[in-house]
Image: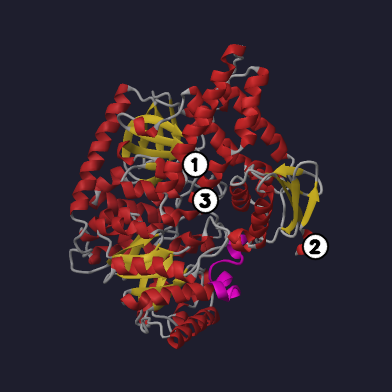
Amino acid sequence: MTENNQTMSTDSMDIQSRQVVVANEHGLHARPAGKLAQQAQAFVAEILIINDEQEVDAKSILDVLTLAAGPGDVLEIRASGSDAVEAADSLQTLFKNRFEE
Amino acid sequence: MADKIITGIPVATGIAIGKAFFVNRNHKAHLPRQTIAASLVPEEIGRLHDAFATVESELSATREQVPAELKDYGLLIDTHILMLKDPKLSGTAADYIKNLGLNAAWALEKAVSDQEAVFGAINDPYIRERMQDVRVVADKVQAKLIGRETDLTAISGRAIIMAHDLTPADTVELKIDKIMGFATVRGGKTSHTGIMARSLGIPALVGVDKLEDSVSDGDLVVIDGLTGKIVVNPTEAELEDYNERAAFFETYTRKIKRRCQLPAETFDGSRVQVLANIELVEEVASVLDNGGEGIGLYRTEYAYLNRTDLPTEEELTEKYIDLAAIMSPRKVVFRTLDLGADKFISAYGELNETNPAMGLRAIRFCLKNPQLFKTQLRAILRASVYGNVSLMFPMISGVKEVRQAKAWLAQAKAELRREGVEYDQNMPVGIMIELPAAVMIAEFLAQEVDFFSIGTNDLIQYSIGVDRTNHHVSYLYQPLHPATLRAIKLVVDAAHQAGIEVSLCGEVASDPFCVPILLGMGIDSISLTPQAIPGIKRIIRQTNMHDCRKLLKNVLECRTVSRINNLVMDNIFKHFPEEVSFFTSLLENDESPS
């Protein structure tokens, strides 16, 4: 998976980017969206979830729901801030584990 | 005259008088819209955040009380809590207060509208529907802001709970000691509202279409679970009348309840087993309390509904063992999964059948999905170690289907044997007789199984070819149609000829007017809703078999339903005047279009 993990240098902080695939059967419906937001809230980093059309705040369950991401969709996690690496890794794991469903 | 009288479907009997309290009502209609002075903005934002925080802590408290078996509702509350914490809602509302000077409730309404616009544009219907959850949490916060909430803990006096719909999660929040009755717009005969009301012994109506338009919070209402009426703001005279009726009914109920543990034995010494139909293990208390001699029909669908995955064998086994253990040594008849048609199993998606009642359901569905079927069979077998478990297959149409189902059962047994898991090798296996085809070949089917259970609700629909929920033809749904009676008789005779027992479940079994005929047929047991058991036992204990046989003989000679209904009514009027005044019989809808 290393080819998906990029670290981009900007003026003051690192931006962590991870590519993930929505692997659970029903896509990012209420429960996984809730888990994602809940987990994101544990970090101080600003975290965005990005698809072809929009970028939304990972800490907002409503925002994540509006992505309407279905099974097989490819998304980008982009985190910036002091704990950006941990945040991006932790959310990536959540996707990999299909939100423990 | 009262302000209004509206009607619904009674799902729990009794009469209650009290004040109407609405839960889950939409506050949008009477929302105050004001602008506020700049100096008051910080205070208003503070009020907004306080309201969010209060609702959040209340929901967290509710969350802790959600029992483990309502896991899905617990997860729903989790979603609601996350929405409350979401800055998209509270933050946007705070911005509206700051930038536009709106009062908090209005600002929140605007934030909700913004979300509605975003969600409305989403193609996925599932995601779009989550807007309902946003609405639910916003309603709760707005109720706090405008002080219009119905605080159920503060109800004084007697309350009748009214709602668009009541979910098990809502009922966790209700403090039940002050609640006298329920009325909802949605829901059917088997809805959660009915189950709960019956277990509390209070009346309930569902399907009350005009409820929200006709009743306001605080109205004095009479809810009549005998006739399905709600009387809004009754006159003195009406109130007196209902008080009297309620008192009569209570006396009658107490009288029959005192004797409900006595055996169901006729004057001339014939015994009939009176069993209960249940859907939830929690209903067992009510079965025993009402004198049920066992469970004649355990509907096993509930564990499969309202979820996206399937229950595991362990989950089912635990539930089934609970039931078998509590009821032991009384018998428990498990009906295998009867899903399809009107019910819906999320894990398999919708089938899109043009005629689901005749489609892939019940045993057909199980035979097509053997993994699902075998999981349930293994769970039932594992519970059978208590020695009181029987199993029956629903919607059997022919001998081959029975043999196929039994082959899966044999395979499940072989697996358990290999694994060293114990089960009852002599567990009786039966089938439901609910299709006319099964009636006609009852003598063949009787050679394949240990017992029959006649499911009259479906049998009547399939044999008369009528959907009882269709207003245009429901008048044809006649339990005592000569064809139905002949069908039941044919099945009972075939069973007895083959030396097996025959039971009957279906509404007919809980109709005091119909029971004497069933007795006349020589039925071995009947299975009915637990709350109807004391009344039916009373009827049985006060009839004699000789009269029942005579009534049956006369009835079988009648060529029209109305003639039969008249005979049956005469019989009841003569012997049971009290029942006539309290119970609406299934037979009363004898109105055909002329």
Q: Quadrant of residue B176?
A: top left
Q: Which type of secondary structure does the marked residue at label 3 adopt?
A: helix
| Residue depicted at x 26% and y 59% | B288
Please tell me which residue lies in front, B449 or B375: B375
The N terminus of chain B: image quadrant: top left
Range covered by the magenta-colored residues: B354-372
Q: Establish if B358 lies above or below B23.
A: below
Mark 1: few, some, or many residues within 10 Å (few <14, many ≥20)? some
Please tell me which residue lies in front, B22 or B353: B22
Type of residue at label 1?
Answer: Asp
Q: Establish if B8 lies above or below B34.
A: below
CA distance separating discs 2 and 1: 51 Å
Q: Residue beneath label 1, please?
A: B165
Type of residue at label 3?
Answer: Leu
Q: Are marks 2 and 1 on the same chain?
A: no
CA distance separating discs 2 and 3: 36 Å
Asked whether the viewer can see residue B454, the reply is yes
Please tell me which residue lies in front, B259 or B504: B259
Q: Residue beneath label 2, please?
A: A3
Asked whether the viewer can see residue B353, the reply is no
Q: How many marks?
A: 3
Q: Residue beneath label 3, please?
A: B75
Q: Establish if B113 lies above or below B414.
A: above
Q: Can you tell which mark lies on residue B459? A: none
Q: Earlier in the sequence, mark 3 or mark 1?
A: 3
